[in-house]
Amino acid sequence: MSEAITPVSWPRPYWQPGEEEAVLQFYVFGKFEPELLIPSPRYGSPGLPAGVEIQRFQNAVLRQWEGYPLNGALGGLIREDTPEAYEQARIAPEVLVVRGVLKDGASLDYLRDTLGVLAGMLDVGGTAVLDPQVLTLFDAAHWRRHYLVKGGAPPRHHVLILRSGEEAADRSWIHTRGMRKFGRPDLSLRHVPDRDLDRAGVLCEKLVELLSLGAQFSAGQQLEVDGLPDGLVAQPGGSLDDPEFNNTHVEFLWPE
C-alpha cells in the first residue's frame, strides 16, 4: 500500500464571504468489498469533510429511481459521449453516491478531501465516476488523468464551458456548468460575435478561476477586458432551478 501523503491546503486567495453553499455530487460505479476501506490518505485526504456522505446502492436497485443518472437525457448524452465508460457503469454491480452541501469558506480543502476519497474508491473497485454537474462520465484512467494533477487540478477541470448558437447567425452564448462545487454562480456571456470567440473563451476560463478561488461579482460591477474599451458589466441573476445551469449565474452582455 502506498504511504499516506500529508494534506496540503488549497487556499482561496480571492475569497469574499457570502451566503452561498458548495454542492458536491458524484456517482462511483464498480464492485466493492463488503467492508469499504478507502485509502484516501495516499492522496492527501483525511477522508470526507463534514457535510459530505457516502451512500451505497446495488445498481439494479438504484436503476429503479426516477432520477437514475444513466437514464433520461443525461444518460443519453453520456452514452453518446463515452460509450465504453457508460457500459462499464451500466453493468457495475454497485454504486457509491457521494454528496453533500457545505458552507462557503476560505479554502478548497473540502474539495481536495472529496477528490482524494474518489481516487481511493477507484483503487478498491471503482470503474467509472459520474459528475452530473458537468454532464460527464469518466472511466477510471480518464478520471485519474484529469484530476490527479500535482498541486491539484486547475479549476477549469472542474467546470464545463459550453458554446451555444444564438438567433443572430454570427453570435454565440458562452456559458458554464459546475460552479456550484465552489459555491459560486455559473457564467453566461451573451451575444459574443464570431470574431471574439477565442477572447471570450479565455475570459471565461479566467473568470472560472477567479470565482473558484473565492471572488464575487456584484450587480453592476465593471469588468475590464482587453480589446473592449467599455469592458463588461456583471448582472447576477437566475435561480438554482434554472435548467440551463442548475445554479444561479452571472451574466455579461458582449457589446455590439
Image (cartoon, rainbow, N blue to C red):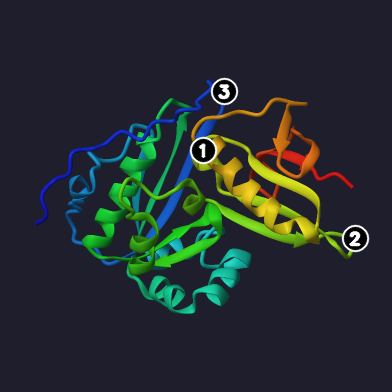
- Residue sitting at 20 percent across and 53 percent down? 36
Residue placed under numbered mark 1 in the picture: 212
User: Residue at point 14% right, 45% down?
Assistant: 4
Which one is earlier in the sequence, the residue at label 3 or at label 2?
A: 3
In the rendered image, the residue lying farthest to the top is 17
Q: Residues within 10 Å of mark 3 (few under 14, many from 20)?
A: few
Q: Residues within 10 Å of mark 2 (few under 14, many from 20)?
A: few
Q: Nearer the viewer, residue 212 or 228?
A: 228
**Which is nearer the N-term, disc 1 or disc 3?**
3
Residue at the spot of label 3? 19
- Where residue 215 sits: x, y (%)? 56, 29
Q: Quadrant of residue 139?
A: bottom left
- Give the SS element for disc 1: helix
For label 2, the residue is 168
Please name the amino acid that badge 2 sits on: Ala
What amino acid is labelled 3 in the image?
Answer: Glu
